[in-house]
């Protein structure tokens, strides 16, 4: 039996050189044993329009939903836009939870990380995301809070996470997510 835990990660930024995408890639190398992180790019998910939710579900959204469903846990890395969650991330979540009653996030454990070039590291977006998790009926872990401020000092020019302190926090967050996921499965 395959006991490897599957974690699905996605970023709340479409930017090719996104720090949040870079943080997810760093997380893939810091995973605990017997776990696997698959990274999904939400680029290509169109703007949600409820008029079409019962027909013509875009392939990209079908793929996103099935990957969420197959995952044991979710990891989100997001920037903060105007003190909140970026529209593309909210749109992707909204699309994935439709039509009503078909929410693949239901009861999934989840962890959040955020990166910003500013001083507060995207913390405010994390709290708005936690509020969304209530309606999604997800099980977020509380810590450590991976809030990466002044990103330009933590990543090199190739997008590698070079800050050892941040690496340590990411490793701890992933370990806590895995422990929490195994506990919920018992
Ligand atoms: C529309 C917009 C709004 C932003 N608002 C915030 C903000 O409220 N707080 C913050 O810390 N950074 C803000 N930023 C700066 C982002 O933290 C920065 O662009 C970051 O690199 C984006 O993440 P990414 O590199 O993963 O794309 C904003 C950037 C944009 C484009």
Image: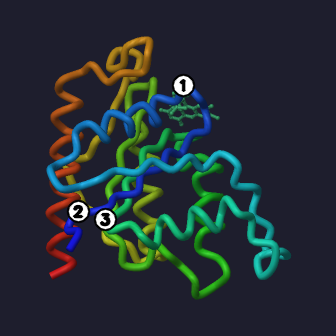
Label ID, residue 6: none
Mark 1 or mark 3, whichever is nearer to me? 1
The answer to whether mark 3 and mark 2 are in CB contact below 8 A is no
Q: Mark 2 points at which residue?
A: 4
Q: Determine whether the residue tagged by mark 1 lies in a helix, strand or loop.
A: loop
How packed mark 3 is, by other alpha carbons closer than 10 Å (few <14, some 14-19, many 20 or more), is many
Label ID, residue 17: 1
Mark 3 or mark 2, whichever is nearer to me? 2
On the rendering, which quadrant does ligand 1 occupy?
top right
Q: Is residue 78 left or right of residue 180?
A: right
Number of numbered tags placed on the structure image = 3
Residue 145 vertical placement versus 6 (above, below): above
Q: Determine whether the residue tagged by mark 3 lies in a helix, strand or loop.
A: strand
Label ID, residue 140: 3
Q: In this view, does 131 lie to the left or right of 73?
A: right
Mark closer to the chain start, 1 or 3: 1
The answer to whether the residue bearing label 1 lies less than 8 angstroms from the nearest atom of ligand 1 is yes
* Residue positioned 25% across, 63% down in the render: 5
- The quadrant of the rendering that contains the N terminus is bottom left
């Amino acid at each position: 039996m395959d006991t490897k835990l599957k974690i699905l990660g996605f970023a709340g930024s479409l930017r090719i050189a996104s720090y949040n995408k870079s943080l997810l890639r760093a997380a893939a190398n810091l995973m605990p044993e017997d776990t696997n992180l698959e990274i999904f790019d939400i680029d290509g998910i169109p703007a949600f329009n409820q008029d079409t939710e019962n027909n013509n579900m875009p392939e990209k959204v079908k793929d996103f939903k099935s990957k969420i469903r197959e995952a044991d846990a979710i990891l989100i890395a997001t920037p903060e836009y105007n003190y909140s969650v970026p529209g593309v991330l909210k749109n992707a979540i909204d699309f994935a939870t439709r039509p009503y009653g078909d929410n693949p996030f239901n009861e999934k454990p989840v962890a959040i990380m955020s990166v910003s070039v500013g001083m507060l590291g995207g913390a405010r977006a994390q709290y708005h995301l936690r509020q969304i998790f209530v309606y999604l009926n997800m099980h977020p872990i509380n810590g450590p809070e991976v809030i990466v401020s002044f990103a330009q000092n933590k990543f090199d020019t190739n997008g590698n996470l070079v800050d050892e302190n941040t690496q340590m926090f990411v490793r701890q967050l992933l370990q806590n997510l895995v422990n929490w996921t195994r506990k919920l499965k018992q």
